[in-house]
Image: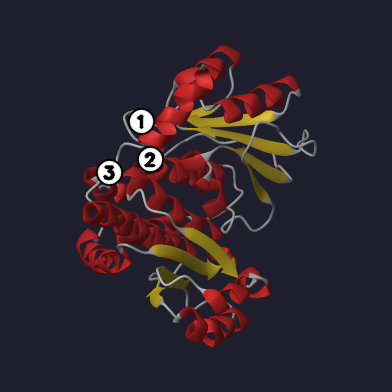
């Protein structure tokens, strides 16, 4: 896991070189995936401004998926049963499909049915292949003239090459998060980033964590701070370019969120993609060091593996 996180910039750089594109103008993008293969859709949705990018986590392709939709089937293993179900439905309905996978049934079906695909390298945990998956997706959208992030991608990749300073910040943060329940907050722009922090803590550190976004959090969850558990540790992901109203809401609520523990993290970078990637990379290192403090191997996920074994019976 150390090696996978340390070479994150190289993953992104290589994946962005994809030549795959679509030759039509969709009015919406529907990305079907689960876990580490779905999160890239949540992250990319903040960068796609002209049309909606919707992430589907589940067995069924929505009824509004039509001939004007671009359906992206994202499964690192190629054998995720929920995503396979969506793939089969999209093919049956003769929709325009592109797959992002490393192999498995999806790759075989793409080759047999002449479905365009981007093949990711094998040998990674799905969550550790985020750089490959996310930047393959961004490359596809760039090639298809749906977004324009070529210069932003260059800045973002350059920013996360600098592992050492990010690792130092992450190590200090992780030492403060041990034996706690991290609660990750960010603006809605960073929904995918906040979720990534939460799931990385879950899978790498084997530690419970939760997330929410502003300002939805203000309409319900803030009431819970009247009786907040003593081991809660709020991690506030901040961007100086968030709207003034969001920044004001965060500042007003800092005393309430500080009742137990509060850590504020400001992103770096000029472009939105660079700021997103910086926070993702920092969160990955935090989860890695948390695993070290918890004395667990960050790579295997035996609880998930056991569930899959039982589901097959």
**Residue under pointer 3:** 4
Classify mark 2: helix, strand or loop: helix
Residue 79 lies, with reference to residue 168, above or below; the image says: above
The numbered mark at residue 129 is 2
Q: Pick the residue in front: 69 or 307.
A: 307
- The Cα atoms of the two marked residues, 1 and 2, are separated by 8 Å
Q: Earlier in the sequence, mark 3 or mark 1?
A: 3
Q: Earlier in the sequence, mark 1 or mark 2?
A: 1
Callout in the foreground (1, 2): 2
Quadrant of image for the N terminus: top left
> Residue, x 46% and y 46% (percent of image)?
134
Residues under numbered marks 3 and 2 in contact, where contact means CB atoms less than 8 Å apart: no
**Residue under pointer 1:** 121
Q: Is residue 135 left or right of residue 252?
A: left
Residues under numbered marks 3 and 1 in contact, where contact means CB atoms less than 8 Å apart: no
Classify mark 1: helix, strand or loop: loop
> Residue, x 78% and y 35% (percent of image)?
66
Q: Position of residue 158 (x, y in %)?
A: 31, 59
Residues under numbered marks 1 and 2 in contact, where contact means CB atoms less than 8 Å apart: yes
């Amino acid at each position: 896991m150390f090696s996978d996180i340390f070479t994150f910039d190289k993953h992104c750089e290589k994946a962005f070189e994809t030549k795959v594109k679509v030759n039509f103008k969709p009015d919406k993008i529907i990305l079907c995936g689960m876990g580490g293969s779905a999160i890239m859709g949540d992250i990319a949705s903040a960068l796609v401004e002209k049309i909606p990018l919707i992430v589907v986590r589940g067995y069924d392709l929505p009824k509004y998926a039509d001939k004007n939709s671009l359906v992206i089937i994202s499964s690192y293993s190629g054998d995720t049963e929920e995503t396979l179900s969506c793939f089969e439905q999209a093919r049956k309905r003769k929709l325009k499909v592109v797959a992002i996978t490393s192999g498995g049934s999806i790759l075989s079906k793409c080759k047999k049915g002449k479905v365009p695909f981007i093949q990711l390298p094998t040998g990674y945990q799905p969550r550790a292949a985020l750089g490959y998956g996310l930047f393959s997706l961004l490359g596809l959208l760039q090639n298809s003239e749906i977004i324009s992030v070529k210069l932003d991608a260059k800045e973002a990749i350059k920013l996360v090459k600098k592992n050492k300073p990010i690792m130092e910040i992450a190590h200090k943060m992780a030492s403060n998060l041990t034996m706690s329940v991290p609660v990750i907050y960010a603006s809605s722009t960073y929904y995918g980033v906040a979720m990534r922090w939460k799931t990385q803590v879950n899978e790498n550190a084997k530690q419970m964590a939760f997330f929410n976004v502003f300002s939805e959090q203000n309409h319900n969850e803030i009431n819970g701070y009247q009786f907040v558990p003593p081991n809660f540790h709020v991690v506030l992901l901040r961007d100086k370019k968030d709207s003034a109203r969001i920044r004001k809401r965060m500042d007003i609520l800092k005393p309430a969120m500080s009742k137990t523990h509060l850590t504020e993290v400001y992103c770096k970078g000029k472009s939105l993609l660079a700021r997103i990637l910086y926070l993702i990379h920092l969160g990955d290192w935090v989860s890695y060091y948390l695993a070290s403090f918890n004395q667990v191997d960050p790579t295997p996920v035996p609880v998930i593996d056991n569930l899959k074994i039982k589901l097959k019976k």
